[in-house]
Image (cartoon, grey):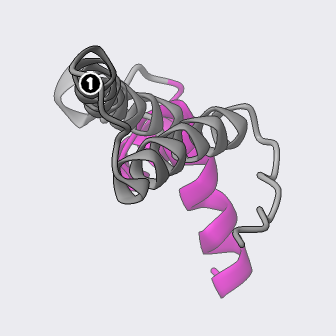
Amino acid sequence: MTDAERAEAEARADRAGLSLGGFFKAAALDAKPPRSSRRPTVDQVELSRLMAQLGKIGSNVNQLAHQANAGSWPERRTLEDAAADVRWMRDSVMRALSITPPADFHP
């Protein structure tokens, strides 16, 4: 098997949520792989990371609202962190949809 063939097989196994061995077993024997060989797809991993990031964004928004209600303006770093979280989320969703995220300009 060439490096390119192996990379293609690994990509197909990953999309199917299988180990490489489980993928070959299913393909060669026309059998269902054992349940234990299943692993999260790339999309599932990415979406799990996205869910974790949503929690961080909620915390940042809560901090911003608390500062605004107290009559002060949030620090620039807090606003930059919140914006970075939103960009990360956007990029994650785009990658999950097989879209290349844009290269953002950050002054």
**Displayed quadrant of residue 8:** bottom right
- The prevailing secondary structure element of the residues shown in magenta is helix
Residue 104 is situated, as x and y percent measured from the top left of the image, at 77, 62
Residue at 73% across, 31% down: 97
Q: Say how many tags the image has.
A: 1
**Displayed quadrant of residue 45:** top left
Residue 47 is situated, as x and y percent measured from the top left of the image, at 45, 29
* Placement of the C terminus among the 4 image quadrants: bottom right
Does residue 75 sit above or below 36 in this rendering?
A: below
Regarding residue 25, the answer to whether it shows in the image is yes
Give the extent of the magenta segment: 1-30
Does residue 26 sit above or below 101 in this rendering?
A: above
* Residue position for label 1: 55
Residue 26 part of the magenta segment: yes
Using the image as rendered, state which of residue 79 and residue 97 is in the foreground.
Answer: 79
Residue 86 is situated, as x and y percent measured from the top left of the image, at 54, 37
Give the secondary structure at mark 1: helix
Residue extending farthest top:
69
Residue at 60% across, 45% down: 87
Residue at 27% across, 33% down: 56
Question: Identity of the amino acid at label 1?
Answer: Gly
Asked whether, in this view, residue 55 is left or right of residue 11, the answer is left
Residue 20 part of the magenta segment: yes
